[in-house]
């Protein structure tokens, strides 16, 4: 897990449903990880779309377009 000083605050508001993720609530690490895979973090999506685990830019556009 990250040395993030905000990890407890982030954990309270993290909407990611992938509970075994090592970057959960470490927002900077999560964002960097997803962007490296040409994705966005789950918190960028409505709950019903986030639950599909499709974090692609295309899924983001479909959800919010």
Image: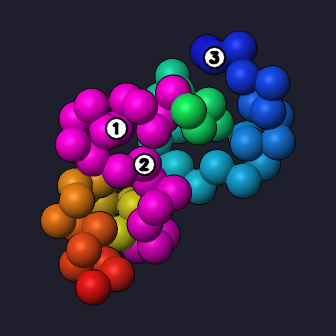
Location of residue 53 in the rendering, given as x and y in whole percent from the top left corner: 31, 52
Q: Is residue 10 visible?
A: yes
Residue at (82% x, 42% y) in the render:
9
Which SS class for mark 1? helix
How far is mark 3 from mark 2, CA to CA?
A: 16 Å
**Image vertical order of residue 52 relative to residue 20, above or below:** below
**Image vertical order of residue 23 relative to residue 49, above or below:** above
Binning the other alpha carbons within 10 Å of mark 3 as few (below 14), some (14 to 19) or many (20 upward) gives some
Residue at (29% x, 68% y) in the render:
60
Binning the other alpha carbons within 10 Å of mark 2 as few (below 14), some (14 to 19) or many (20 upward) gives many
- Secondary structure mostly seen in magenta is helix
State the residue position of label 3. Answer: 2
Which sits earlier in the primary sequence, circle 3 or circle 2?
3
Location of residue 37 in the rendering, given as x and y in whole percent from the top left corner: 22, 35
CB within 8 Å, label 1 to label 2: yes
State the residue position of label 1. Answer: 34
Residue at (22% x, 59% y) in the render:
57
Which SS class for mark 3? loop
Give the residues drawn in magenta, as a range: 29-48
Which sits earlier in the primary sequence, circle 1 or circle 2?
1
State the residue position of label 2. Answer: 41
């Amino acid at each position: 897990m990250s040395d993030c000083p905000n990890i407890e605050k982030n954990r309270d508001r993290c909407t990611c449903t992938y509970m075994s993720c090592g970057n959960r609530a470490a927002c900077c690490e999560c964002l960097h990880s997803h962007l490296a895979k040409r994705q966005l973090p789950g918190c960028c999506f409505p709950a019903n779309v986030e639950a599909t685990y499709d974090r692609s830019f295309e899924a983001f556009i479909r959800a919010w377009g």
